Amino acid sequence: MTDTPTSTTMRAQSRENKHHATSLRVERSAVSLVLEHGFDNVTVDMICGQSGISQRTFFNYFKTKKAAIIGAEPPTIDEGRARAFIAAPGDDLLPDALTLMSAIGPREGMDEQLFTDRLRIFGLHPELMQEQMERMTRVTSEITELVYLRLGRGAVTEVENDADRAFRHGQAELLTHAMLGVLRFMALQWIPDFERPVGADGAADRAATPTLAESLSRTVELLRRTLSIPGL
Amino acid sequence: MTDTPTSTTMRAQSRENKHHATSLRVERSAVSLVLEHGFDNVTVDMICGQSGISQRTFFNYFKTKKAAIIGAEPPTIDEGRARAFIAAPGDDLLPDALTLMSAIGPREGMDEQLFTDRLRIFGLHPELMQEQMERMTRVTSEITELVYLRLGRGAVTEVENDADRAFRHGQAELLTHAMLGVLRFMALQWIPDFERPVGADGAADRAATPTLAESLSRTVELLRRTLSIPGL
DNA sequence: ACTCTAAGTTGCAGTTGCTGCAAATTGCCT
DNA sequence: AGGCAATTTGCAGCAACTGCAACTTAGAGT
């Protein structure tokens, strides 16, 4: 009667909401099961059972078993951040680029538990970490483009030919790939050490995995001091 | 009669030789089939058929279908090179490290055709390239150790505490990962462009894929000029 | 030359990830 | 209520991969 949802918007989200909900449920099931039994000892059917969906539906949601564990979030670059990156004051290219790439990290309103659990899984199963990094490489070209643009600032006054542009693009590509390596390094530091059993004290665990910002600044600092080494 | 192989050495190699021979035969079959039909349209049974072995034997030789395509060569670090790297004159850490890692490249007495074919496959199927890079990451720790040792040269005179060592190790790790990224960049440049059909002129093709040494020096040069950019 | 043993090969059956297809179900709109 | 379209599901099937037991071969001893 009065509570009939005449509002279209509410119902319009219903499908989408439900989808997102089950998706999350499946991810959680997958992650917890893998943490308990190990990747190889978890079958898709198990995950389905715990999530209350059929196997066929599972594969409607996720392309592969791995995908369900890693999560389906699309690591796309935010438009605003991109502009900010290009226009930013010019003395911190590397740190800025690293920050830009850190979009993998825990995002606004994300399930904290799920995130750290995944981190733990990455520590236990390098193959999955690999998969995650592969996703990163997919945005390589986007980032390269941004770095290219940023490198081009200030050069506008001078005459620039194709060779210059190509060279700068090469630089951008090189830098991007190198920074991707640094990002991997950062991620590795982030992963909790193997076989450190979850202590009774939750606070201790939270201390073990630093914030994104912390990791970032620490890595940047290390990078700075490393680049200043005389013998290259 | 007279040709009876009394010599033990000749026969002693027989087993090993045969193994290596069939291994190579399988790799060749796999590569050529994939080039012809694409990765997904090639079954293990096809490869077995063309290689004259049973499927079961196939999996005795290679852990996975992918492994057969990218080859089973263990990318381990040569002992001699390792020493040379540590003791080398100190102004070229990055180039030297990159050279060290280039062990992926075509090795002494390797099938040239097979190598370039694989390169082409990598261009067509990024997933396989990915697999190849994953192998690289497995030697990360070895290389890190070497870089660590090299960074430590000359510091012997001064007093060094644990913190210093840990810091240096961090630097080595960071550098290694970054260089791994650069290596990936180099490998990508190396891959022949997609859909450039094999021309009738073989020489043109050979010109398309530069030597390891060429790629290496070019990359090093680019790296140098990039690192000298003022804005980091 | 003959045999014996261990290494290597194969067939077979079974598990698991994953896909296409068509039927059943569900959600939403009129 | 009725109907349309999106989801979900069951089923059948393919391909990668594994364990096991039987078989074949190579190399060493006698």
Image (cartoon, coloured by chain):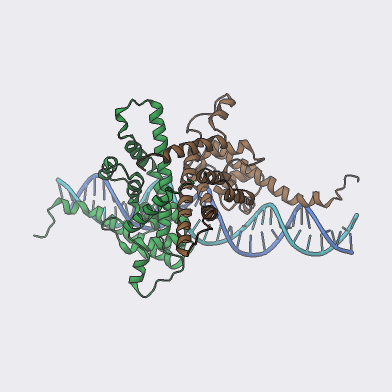
Chain colours: A green, B brown, C cyan, D blue
Whether residue B92 is visible, yes or no, is yes
* Residue most extreme to the left: A2
Which one is nearer the viewer's eye here, B33 or A199? A199
* Residue most extreme to the top: B201
Hey, which quadrant is residue A199 in on the image?
Answer: bottom left
Q: Residue at x 31, y 59 (%)?
A: A22
The total of numbered circles placed on residues is 0
* Residue D4 appears left or right of A56: left
Q: Position of residue A203 (x, y in %)?
A: 33, 71
The quarter of the image holding the N terminus of chain A is bottom left
Q: Position of residue B159 (x, y in %)?
A: 49, 62
Whether residue B69 is visible, yes or no, is no
Hey, which quadrant is residue B116 in on the image?
Answer: top right
Does A113 appear above or below B172? below
Q: Position of residue B137 (x, y in %)?
A: 51, 52
Does A12 appear above or below A194? above
Q: Residue at x 58, y 53 (%)?
A: B63
Which one is nearer the viewer's eye here, B116 or A205? A205
Does D2 appear above or below B216? below
* Residue most extreme to the front: B157
Which one is nearer the viewer's eye here, B145 or A107? B145
* Residue A124 appears left or right of A23: right
Q: Position of residue A209 (x, y in %)?
A: 36, 63
* Residue most extreme to the bottom: A200
